[in-house]
Amino acid sequence: METYSGTKLASADNEFPRRYALLEYPFRSLNELLIQDRMTKDPVTVGTRDTLAVAKAKMQAGSYRRLPVVDAEKVVGILSEYDVNNYAHLLDSTLVQTAMTGSPVTVSPSQSLEHAVALLRTHNTGALLVVDHGKLVGIVTAKDLSMAEPRPLPEWDPRTHGKTPSRS
């Protein structure tokens, strides 16, 4: 069996068919992988004085579900698609600081992915802001870690196609 830069290649003498020649090969366990390996670096942000219309435009432009909120280069909150949708008819007149979740859960880029998974589950959240020496350097989401969203929203669930599921 040959190994090549983080990937396992199936050779002709093993049981894998040739069409499955390139397979992922995990070199490190979850507690050895670092947040910096999976985070989105330099995420798009919004300010507390921006309107929700500005935030929604940024979310749609980048297909983001969440945006970090910064004020004077300091992380002060996180704004989710759900937060924005709560003010759907007031986007132009509502400031981000009104809808955001303050005091977001933060992590260091040098912490393990195992730690990130534990924090996402403990805080029942879908994203962690990555801060290094007080500066926002990234965001890591449940999707980045191949986890399910902690609270799937009806509009995110492809089975409901934006309809609120009926309760039995």
Image (cartoon, grey):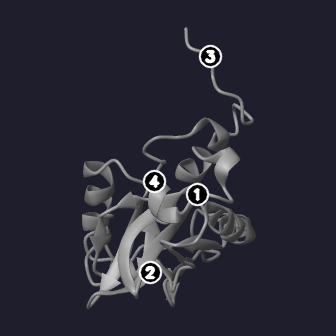
Q: Residues within 10 Å of mark 1 (few under 14, many from 20)?
A: some
Query: Considering the numbered disc 4 on the image, is that residue within a helix, a strand or a loop?
Result: loop
As measured in the structure, the alpha-carbon distance from the residue carrying label 1 to the one carrying label 3 is 30 Å
Residue at 27 percent across and 84 percent down: it is 110
> Which comes before the other along the chain, label 2 or label 1?
1
Residue 30 in sight here: no
> Which comes before the other along the chain, label 1 or label 4?
1
Residue 83 in sight here: yes
Q: Which residue is mark 2?
A: 138
Residue type (three-letter) at the residue carrying disc 3: Ser
Q: Which mark is residue 16?
A: none
Q: Nearer the viewer, mark 1 or mark 3?
A: 1
* Camera-side residue of 12 and 103: 103
Give above or below for 25 relative to 78: below
Tell me residue 19's x, y (percent). Answer: 74, 67
Q: Which residue is mark 1?
A: 94
> Which comes before the other along the chain, label 1 or label 3?
1
As measured in the structure, the alpha-carbon distance from the residue carrying label 2 to the one carrying label 3 is 37 Å
Residue type (three-letter) at the residue carrying disc 4: Met
Q: Which residue is mark 4?
A: 147
Residue at 75 percent across and 35 percent down: it is 161
Q: Which mark is residue 166?
A: 3
